[in-house]
Amino acid sequence: MTIKEELALVRRAKDGDKDSLSTLWEGINPKLYGYLVNVLKDKSQADDILQETWLKAIAKIDKFTDRGVRFSAWLFAIARNECRQFWRQNAKFNSLSLEANGLDRPVQMAPSLEAGLLVDSILAKLTTEEQEILRLRFIGQLDFKAIAKIMAISVISARVRLHRILKKARSLT
Amino acid sequence: MLTEWGRRQQRGFADQEIKKRVLNALTGRAPAEARILRSWPWLRISMVASASAVLVWLVIVGNWTLPGSSPVAVTYQSQADTASLSPSSASKEMAVGDTATDDRSGVASSYEPVAYWPQTDVNYKDSREYLKVYYRANIQTRKVDLIANRAQTTVRGYGGRIDSSSLNQRSAYISFIVPKKSFEAFKTELKSLVGARFITENLDSQNLLPQKVNIEDQTKTASSSLADYQSQKKNLTDKHNQTMAGYQSQISYYSNQVWNAQQELNQTTSTARQAELRSQISSANANWSRIKKLMDSANSDYNKKAAALDSQIKTQQTQLVSLKTQDTNLIDNVETVQGMISVNWISYGGIVQLYVPFYRWLIAGAMLIVILAAVFGRGRSFETV
């Protein structure tokens, strides 16, 4: 779905068109849900946060303005905030905060999640911010502008950081 | 590998209940709130700074590209007659003995106080001042002709004289003279024509004491020479009169001798006596003629010398008159202020430059902000719920 198509659907959804919203749902959810599962390592939690994300987005859909960034990027930002809030409320998961707090130790993988994949092992050696950028770029398939918006950094910083992450990932293989 | 990995991480969401709930939320949502506060992305610092930098740059560049915006080199040209207020006439008569160093007898190439090279060393104890004042004003305005006309009216209003003027749409130049006694009032009125930032003034002054001393010295010399020549003339005349008196008495003696001898010759019958008398008469006549020649020679000599002395006396008297005129002209010159007003058109950019002289720093600062914002600026995050 191109950004224009997406924005057109959003405009119709603002007017109450459920079909447009359904189309958006079908188009964005695979990426968003995949992102949430990879972050939370818990499908049920991912379901809850996915629902919360969409409900909040629809409640404030009129607030979304077209600034050349996708509606899906906005959803990812909401989802990210929801994850953060979830971790804040669940103290045992504080170490898994998305904020770059300088921790470089690998993410604790929940026992239920798949292990042994090469990428997952690389991810485990990256910082949380680096993992986030990889997820947004490769799972969410977001462009640098959207990633910069979500991470609250400049577009140039987003490009530079991804370049460094890939370089680091190559060195870890 | 990462792209493939990302694609594999994506997964469909099969829970229709949640989907239904979400779709129903669309119709059940609250009406759109009236957004009072709107985002103004174009008010970001970097965009404002870049717009300001571009605007200021255009104005300044626009100012630079406009012809005639910068002051043109000033040319002084005096076209007034050699009246008493004219400095050129004073300079002609003042440079006695050396006119090569004075360039103001005609048209000068640039306006600057004339360097009067002193011809006499001035005693350091002489504290007299004969200050010649030169005034220069540069006015910037967007109404060149109006201000130029007002300036000329101001000059005339204070008893001054316009020596030369030129006027076009972009610039005007007025060369003038005003009496020193009304100069301060004239300056005040001229400055009131425009704002303080739009006028710059320059005052130069030169002490003409060396010229004054030179005139005084020459006057003293001429007076002394005149007295000397007059004394010589008197002495010459007296001596000549004395000489002529001596010759005249001899003439008279020999005339009497001739007359007496002639009388006796007419009466005597003695042949010997007649011969003697005839010899006396002849001798007396010869002496008379000799004395007469001496008198003529003395007269001729006297006339030549007297004429020479008269010529010298006349020269010195003429010199004294000339020096008196020079002195009067110098005093008149000192009592006037010579000036030049240039009026130049100013652009809006130039006006900005007057009020904000450090505009270059503003532009540099704005550009720096733009660059820093572009490179290091953090994008605004979404206004998430």
Image: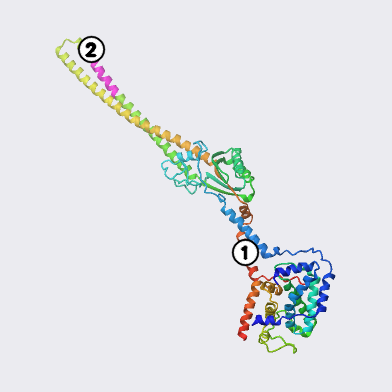
Q: Is residue B220 above or below residue A130?
A: above
Three-letter residue code for mark 1: Met
Q: Residue furthest left?
A: B272
Could you tell me how far apart the alpha carbons at marks 2 and 1 are, in whole angstroms?
134 Å
Classified by dominant secondary structure, the portion drawn in magenta counts as helix
Q: Amino acid at mark 2?
A: Gln
Q: Quadrant of residue A82?
A: bottom right
Residue closer to the observer: B366 or A104: A104
Quadrant housing the C terminus of chain B? bottom right
Residue B94, horizontal then vertical, whole percent: 46, 40
User: With B348 as the anchor, is B293 left or right in this view?
Assistant: left
Task: Indicate the secondary structure of the residue bearing disc 1.
Answer: helix
- Which quadrant of the figure has residue A43? bottom right
Viewer can see residue B358: no
Confirm whether the magenta stretch covers residue B257. yes
For mark 1, what is the residue? B367
* Residue B296 as seen in the image, left or right of residue B193: left
Indicate which label's residue lies in the foreground, 2 or 1.
1
Residues under numbered marks 2 and 1 in contact, where contact means CB atoms less than 8 Å apart: no
Image: magenta residue range: B247-262
Residue drawn 73% across and 73% down?
A72
**How many numbered circles are shown?**
2
Label 2: element kind: helix
Q: Residues within 10 Å of mark 1 (few under 14, many from 20)?
A: some
Instruction: Name the foreground residue: A26 vs B183.
Output: A26
Q: Tell me, for residue B263, which label it has, or none.
A: 2
